[in-house]
């Protein structure tokens, strides 16, 4: 008992994240090599994305090329911001905010992409106006199989778009508010008291995230069979994987750091070390996903036939059969 009471805590474990120069000074050969390799990965990811943007700009029409640029940029942007956060630990709050705000827009753009691949809003409604959509999908209602199917309409499509768009807007607003409060010392992830701001803002952002993911899942689950020729299933899988790695993985590491499971390693406190490990893992993961995205998005696909073309083809075929019978 006396030994436990006599244990001293290194003062560095209770300090704020170190300055960039302090991080560089304490790097040994292995750590410096690791930092250089991860920085190289982040730079390659960014260069590949810029080259891909130039390709999409030349090959695809507006607005589809803009949508694809946003979506394919999720992994490189997160990788680049993670690299900044790795070298400058005090800037992690800002780099994480930038990554999260960008991905909030990507969530909405994924929904827009699926509609654009089917010819836009007008063709989408013409194609599915007579069909019913299953809404018992994740993350909200995957267990509610008793929910009735709903008819696709312009009003329903508007609410689905609004459900995804609200996250892009409110996430950005709340992130900016969090940074402003953080600079004033009023926002601290380790402050779990009821009077703290983090305990109110973060759960609300989590609710907004779930609400935004539901419309995207509804659209995908009901139309993915029409988009298999466009490789929409692997594109959607990559989007989901980026979501898990950038949101869930980071949250788990932060919780472990707050509980002290991730040990302090001066000059890094437990929380700062957890953030550093999260940034390093993110760079490697996003680099791999950037390579996969390069293969999925740096190519052109044949456009799907519009609803009117399908209808005209069926009418022409029916007319030809009738003339043949006569």
Image (cartoon, rainbow, N blue to C red):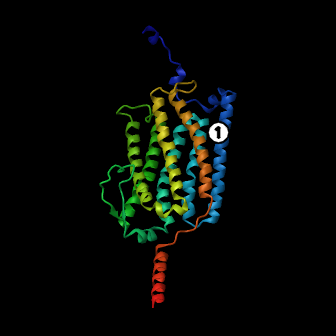
Q: Is residue 43 above or below residue 62?
A: above
Q: Which residue is drawn at 62% across and 58% down?
A: 298
Residue nearest the observer in this picture, 236 or 195: 236
The answer to which quarter of the image holds residue 178 is: top left
- Left or right: residue 212 compared with residue 267: left
Category of crowding for the residue at label 1, using alpha-carbon neighbours closer than 10 angstroms: few (below 14), some (14–19), many (at least 20): many
- Left or right: residue 276 compared with residue 40: left
Q: Could you tell me which secondary element the residue under label 1 belongs to? A: helix
The answer to which quarter of the image holds residue 163 is: bottom left
Q: In this view, does 254 lie above or below 13?
A: below
Q: Give the farthest residue toward the front.
A: 325
Q: Which residue is drawn at 54% across and 23% down?
A: 12
- Left or right: residue 116 compared with residue 28: left
Q: Mark 1 points at which residue?
A: 38
Quarter of the image where the N terminus is located = top left
Q: Give the farthest residue toward the bottom.
A: 326
Residue nearest the observer in this picture, 268 or 247: 247
Where does the image place residue 275, in percent across and percent down from the top left?
53, 34
* Number of residue marks: 1
Quarter of the image where the C terminus is located = bottom left
Where does the image place residue 192, in percent across and percent down from the top left?
39, 32
Where does the image place residue 304, in percent across and percent down from the top left?
52, 69
Where does the image place residue 142, in percent across and percent down from the top left?
36, 50
- Left or right: residue 277 compared with residue 260: right
Q: Residue at x 58, y 45 (%)?
A: 286
């Amino acid at each position: 008992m006396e030994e436990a009471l006599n244990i001293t805590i290194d003062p560095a474990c209770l300090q704020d994240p170190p300055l960039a120069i302090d991080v560089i000074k304490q790097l040994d050969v292995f750590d410096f090599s690791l930092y250089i390799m991860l920085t190289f990965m982040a730079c390659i990811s960014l260069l590949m994305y810029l080259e891909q943007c130039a390709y999409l700009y030349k090959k695809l029409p507006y607005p589809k090329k803009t949508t694809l640029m946003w979506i394919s940029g999720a992994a490189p942007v997160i990788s680049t911001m993670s690299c900044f956060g790795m070298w400058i630990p005090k800037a992690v709050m800002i780099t994480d905010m930038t990554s999260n705000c960008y991905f909030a827009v990507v969530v909405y753009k994924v929904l827009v992409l699926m509609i654009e691949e089917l010819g836009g809003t007008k063709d989408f409604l013409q194609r599915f106006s007579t069909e019913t959509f299953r809404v018992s999908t994740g993350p909200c209602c995957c267990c509610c199989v008793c929910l009735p199917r709903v008819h696709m309409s312009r009003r329903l499509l508007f609410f689905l778009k609004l459900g995804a768009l609200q996250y892009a807007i409110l996430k950005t607003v709340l992130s900016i508010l969090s940074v402003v409060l953080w600079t004033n010392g009023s926002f601290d992830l380790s402050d779990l008291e009821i009077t703290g701001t983090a305990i109110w803002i973060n759960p609300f952002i989590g609710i907004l995230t779930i609400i935004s993911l539901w419309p995207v899942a509804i659209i995908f689950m009901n139309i993915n069979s029409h988009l298999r020729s466009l490789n929409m299933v692997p594109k959607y899988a990559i989007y989901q994987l980026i979501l898990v790695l950038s949101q869930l993985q980071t949250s788990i590491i932060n919780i472990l750091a707050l509980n002290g499971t991730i040990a302090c390693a001066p000059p890094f406190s437990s929380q700062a070390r957890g953030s550093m490990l999260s940034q390093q893992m993110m760079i490697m993961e996003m680099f791999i996903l950037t390579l996969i995205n390069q293969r999925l998005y740096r190519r052109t696909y044949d456009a799907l036939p519009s609803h009117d073309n399908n209808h005209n083809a069926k009418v022409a075929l029916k007319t030809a059969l009738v003339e043949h019978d006569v």
